[in-house]
Image: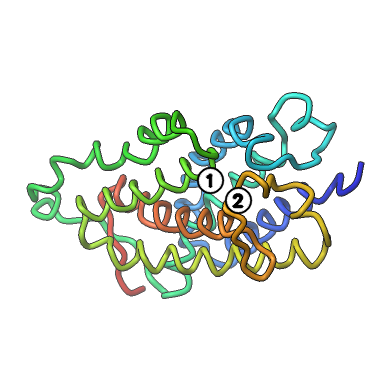
């Protein structure tokens, strides 16, 4: 099958970056493990997107036969850890616990609700008559908005985290495009998408990268009652 191992190589490239960051920045290892283990089960959502959004050739042709594939779990594990620490690594920051006074501010009465927004909103958005990728992107953006309403101090790293992960994700997408010519055109269901491409990259993938960076950069700090400070 054409491009049979491309999805494996691409997801493994993210995993290699994960391993590099894990090795070079021991202060972020706990956060990376937490994020990656939490994100890995989201590989189970792959049947929602196959073949409506894309249909990648996969190991043992699992995606075509079942909708599931091994590569999705590798990808989910890797981007979960990377996106959560990328902001702090690049800006040389660390996380510290919020004070009891800060945790008792009135906004935090919405703490659990705000954390649930990206996960609870996706099933409802999925029912709308549009490609499921748009439901996913919208749910992530709503989750980021909810988080910053509950924790205004997360606004700057949420926005910058979205931009940083978008930049990283775009580099990986360009690497995919250049190393496997024609792969995007064959695998992505472009006829059911907006048709907008930037340097040959579907805008939906770029929006996914930005949305994921938005919601994932601050989710650990939000959940664990922490904030980023200069290292």
- Counting from the top left corner in percent of width and height, residue 187 is at 75, 47
Q: Nearer the viewer, residue 227 or 62?
A: 62
Q: Nearer the viewer, residue 117 or 132?
A: 132
Which residue is found at the position 48% from the left and 60% from the top? 210
Task: Identify residue for label 2.
Answer: 78
In contact (CB < 8 Å): disc 2 and disc 1: yes
- Counting from the top left corner in percent of width and height, residue 20 is at 64, 63
Image label count: 2
Where is residue 174, by image quadrant? Answer: bottom right
Figure check: 155 above or below 1: below
**Cα distance, mark 2 to mark 1?**
6 Å
Dot 1 lies on which element?
helix
Where is residue 64, by image quadrant? Answer: top right
Task: Identify residue for label 1.
Answer: 36
- Counting from the top left corner in percent of width and height, residue 4 is at 86, 44
Quarter occupied by the C terminus: bottom left
Which residue is found at the position 17% from the left and 41% from the top? 110
Which residue is found at the position 72% from the left and 58% from the top? 13
């Amino acid at each position: 099958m054409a491009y049979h191992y491309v999805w494996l190589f691409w997801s493994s490239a993210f995993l290699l970056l994960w391993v590099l960051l894990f090795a070079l920045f021991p202060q972020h290892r706990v956060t990376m493990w937490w994020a990656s283990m939490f994100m890995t089960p989201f590989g189970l959502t792959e049947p929602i997107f196959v073949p409506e959004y894309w249909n990648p050739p996969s190991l043992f042709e699992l995606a075509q036969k079942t909708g599931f594939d091994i590569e999705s779990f590798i990808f989910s594990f890797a981007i979960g850890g990377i996106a959560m620490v990328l902001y702090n690594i690049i800006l040389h920051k660390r996380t510290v616990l919020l004070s009891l006074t800060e945790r008792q501010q009135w906004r935090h009465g919405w703490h659990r609700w705000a954390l649930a927004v990206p996960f609870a909103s996706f099933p409802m958005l999925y029912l709308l008559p549009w490609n499921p990728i748009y439901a996913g992107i919208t749910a992530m953006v709503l989750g980021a908005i909810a988080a910053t309403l509950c924790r205004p101090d997360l606004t700057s790293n949420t926005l910058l985290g979205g931009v940083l992960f978008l930049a990283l994700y775009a580099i990986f997408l360009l690497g995919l495009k250049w190393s496997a010519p024609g792969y995007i055109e064959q695998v992505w269901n472009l006829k059911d998408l907006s048709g907008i491409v930037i340097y040959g990259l579907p805008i939906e993938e770029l929006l996914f990268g930005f949305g994921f960076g938005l919601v994932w950069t601050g989710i650990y700090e939000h959940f664990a009652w922490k904030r980023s400070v200069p290292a």
